[in-house]
Amino acid sequence: MKIPFIDKRLEDIYSKVLNGSRLSKKDGICIYKTHDLIGLGQIANHVRKSLHGNKAFYIYNMHLNYTNVCKNRCSFCAYAKDDGEKGAYVWSIEDIEKKLLERIDEPVKELHIVGGLNEDLSFEYFINLLKTVKKIRPNATIKAFTCVEIDYLSNLAKLSIKETIQKLKDAGLEMMPGGGAEVLNSRIHEALFPKKIGHKRWLEIVKAVHKAGIKTNATMLYGHIETTEERVDHLISLRDLQDETHGFSAFIPLAFHSKNTQMSHIPSTTAIDDLKNVAAARLMLDNFDHIKAYWVMIGEKLAQVALSFGADDLDGTIIEEKITHTAGATSATGLTKDQMEEMIIAAGFTPVERDSFYNPIK
Ligand code: V47
Ligand code: SF4
């Protein structure tokens, strides 16, 4: 298909994509810098359609954020609290049972479980948490804990990363979400989340997780202090690791929301930047099968548009999303299955309900 590019630099990128050649750092920077958003979108859509045709995936999922008490206090996070601070909470195993039982009649296929680093919780709590969830929801996949939590749990349990993963796996862990990487860069790490593990450690843990046979997602938190070059380097680091492990399932660009954070002066991301991040991911991450447009962060309407800019997945129904809504997200806190399907159909795609591993639900 011939694309009438306004920015002629995109012609080279399109030729590389058509030839199956890998895009360079310079191409990545051009993708972010171009003003030819429609031309860029058409290239990304070409790749998206060649991989997934007209399908757009979603999952019936549920988020469980077991505690918001966190010792790291990253400056971009509105969700975390100190112990004893107003609004701080920890769910007991009984609270978690209650939450699950309240919605037991719903066909939930995945439980997305993450929380803060709360020094009051023991390693046994996490094992009981996984076992309880599996007992109540034996047919739903447990996608839980970021590499940040895995690092913390290995210190707590005084076990190696490998042993920690094995214990969690034995208790029911089946997949891991992509959070915690933020931007894989030392400058940003020092400036925004110095208490959290750095990028080398994040990559080391993710590698160990993949080696243990657990698939993970990957994310990038954009729209704060990062430069274009740092964004592209982040994508290339993920692409390099994927070449080695093939353990990443989906990539999710996460749009920074600054309300109630220590960085509340930073304005919201623009629709143009949100779409560029989706397209950049689709084009740079040539070894990732799936790119998610996370409707919670970019809003339902833009997520529909993102399906034509490289994304093939809208994540899920969610219900009770906390992390982004505490930071000012104006999207719904959850959607019904019908709403997800209507969104996808209205955007011109065919909805496919999936499980955590992208198998269609019959
Ligand atoms: O790691 C924290 C981000 C992440 C803010 O793998 C913020 O399927 C925006 O990783 N504004 C957690 N973002 C969410 C996450 C995720 C979400 C959906 C699906 C999957 C998946 C993973 O949220 C954190 C951090 O990068 N975050 N604060 C904020 N103010
Ligand atoms: Fe804690 Fe995660 Fe928030 Fe950082 S982003 S303060 S690690 S909950």
Image (cartoon, rainbow, N blue to C red):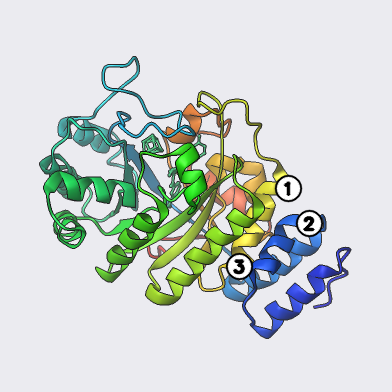
- The image's mark for residue 218 is none
Q: Which quadrant: the C terminus?
A: bottom left
Q: Circle 2: is it few (<14), some (14-19), or many (20+) Cα within 10 Å?
A: many
Inter-mark Cα distance, 1 to 3:
18 Å
Residue position for label 2? 37
Asked which secondary structure carries label 2, the reply is helix
Q: Amino acid at mark 3?
A: Met
Image coordinates for residue 205, horizontal then vertical, percent: 31, 59
- The image's mark for residue 284 is 3
Residue position for label 1? 272
Inter-mark Cα distance, 2 to 1:
7 Å
Q: Nearer the viewer, residue 176 or 197?
A: 197
Labelled pair 2, 1 in contact (Cβ < 8 Å): yes
Question: Residue lying farthest top?
Answer: 86
Q: Amino acid at mark 2?
A: Leu
Q: Which quadrant: the N terminus?
A: bottom right
Image coordinates for residue 355, horizontal then vertical, percent: 38, 60
| Dot 2 or dot 1, earlier in sequence | 2
Image coordinates for residue 199, horizontal then vertical, percent: 41, 54
Inter-mark Cα distance, 3 to 2:
16 Å
Asked which secondary structure carries label 3, the reply is helix
Query: Depth-wise, is mark 1 or mark 3 nearer the camera?
Result: 3
